Amino acid sequence: MQLVEVGTQLAYQKEFLQLPVRLYRNDPCWIRPLDNDIEAVFDPAINEFFKNGTCIRWLLLDDKGQTIGRVAAFINFELANQDNDQPTGGIGFFECIDSEEAAFRLFDTCREWLRSQGMEAMDGPINFGERDRWWGLLVKGFDQEPTYGMPYTKPYYMPLFEKYGFREYFRQFTYWLPMPEDQVKALLHPSIFERAQRTLNDPTYTFRHVEKVKLAKYAHDFRLIYNKAWARHHSVGEITEEKANALMVRMKPILKEDLMWFCYHQEEPIAFFIMLPELNQIFKHVNGKLDFIGKLKVAYHQLMKTNKKAFGVIFGTIPEYQGRGIESAIALAFSKAAWQKDYQYKELELNWIGDFNPKMIRFVKMLGSVVNKEYVTYRYLFDRTKEFKKHPLI
């Protein structure tokens, strides 16, 4: 076997994209990620994580020169020491044939490179970027199509990681539930539904979806809620006004106004429930290529409204209003609006809920949702005698 660095060689970059196409050709649920999305991770001109980090990726070739594995290793130096007992780097975009020898060669290479950069542990498989993309190893839900930006991986990857010595750092869940109000009502516990209904009818609370012409206002409100609800948690920093505006602008081409909801108490922003169309239900028709033909296919499926699934991006309530049923009420407000025979979206996936967030798990369970996918984020300590600690609860 031979290991080669991808670097700037176009042939190797193409192989990095093509290996999964060959590995998953017989997996009916696999949806090919957009080539541009993958390559953007490794482009310093696009990925802002290169400002405080570094990244390298490799291909593993067999004796005939055929690609049998790939992997990337990376470090965000700003976060490497944050709230960790040891500097921790990451590995990701791991794909490999069912071979312990090949997989361990890739893991060894990542470990030694990260050690040379001063790291003492590695998490994987994760992303050289935000947690909402390419994060975790799929361990349940191989009969489900992947949500946009989330990995779909081989069942045999799990024993490869664990036999090498990776241990579960945390687990992520994707929850599924139907959309219409009558089904939501049937799933909710009666007491929860009644409390949500009372809150919804309370005139001091206002529930409304976004309007594209007022995105600057909603970006401002999003930042206020986010920084109170999330920024105090482990490894989550505050979001600036500039970043909040940029986020809304980036989502504008795909957002549907009635999928993004805010709650106000006497006009003070206190909660949000941000959903988007599940883009993989459209992108699965373009085979990873968002070229001219791919864009025509996207336009066709958008026009014909073939996508019936939305996914929850993020939801949060500021601390002083938590435990008052606001979360259930905002979900109910949305479901009432969606209760139309011709409403496009019939099901919702609540994506990326960590096992370290028991409050959020309780909330999504109260909605009547069920787990349909699970992912594991592993950690490997270079010093095998050191105590292993799981992700702290928030």
Image: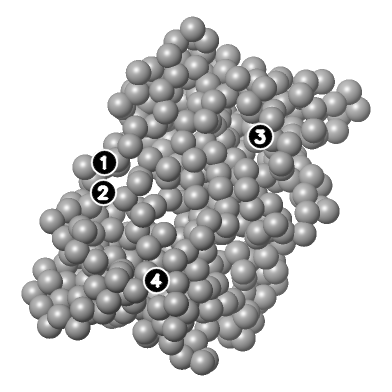
Q: Which residue is mark 3?
A: 158
Q: Residue 137: give x, y in percent of width and height.
A: 59, 40
3D distance between C-alphas at marks 1 and 2: 6 Å
Q: Which mark is residue 233?
A: 1
3D distance between C-alphas at marks 4 and 3: 34 Å
3D distance between C-alphas at marks 4 and 1: 28 Å
Q: Which mark is residue 84?
A: none
Please report whichever mark, 3 or 2, sits nearer to the chain's N-terminal start. 3
Q: Residue 6: give x, y in percent of width and height.
A: 66, 32
Q: Amino acid at mark 3?
A: Met
Q: Secondary structure at mark 1?
A: loop
Q: Which residue is mark 4?
A: 188
Local crowd at mark 4 within 10 Å, few (<14), some, or many (≥20)? some
Q: Secondary structure at mark 4?
A: loop
Q: Residue 381: give x, y in percent of width and height.
A: 50, 17
Q: Secondary structure at mark 3?
A: helix
Nearer the observer: mark 4 or 3; the answer is 4
138 or 299: nearer the viewer: 138
Residues at discs 1 and 2 in contact (Cβ within 8 Å):
yes
Please say whether residue 173 is visible from this viewpoint: yes
Q: Amino acid at mark 1?
A: His
Q: Residue 252: give x, y in percent of width and height.
A: 39, 71
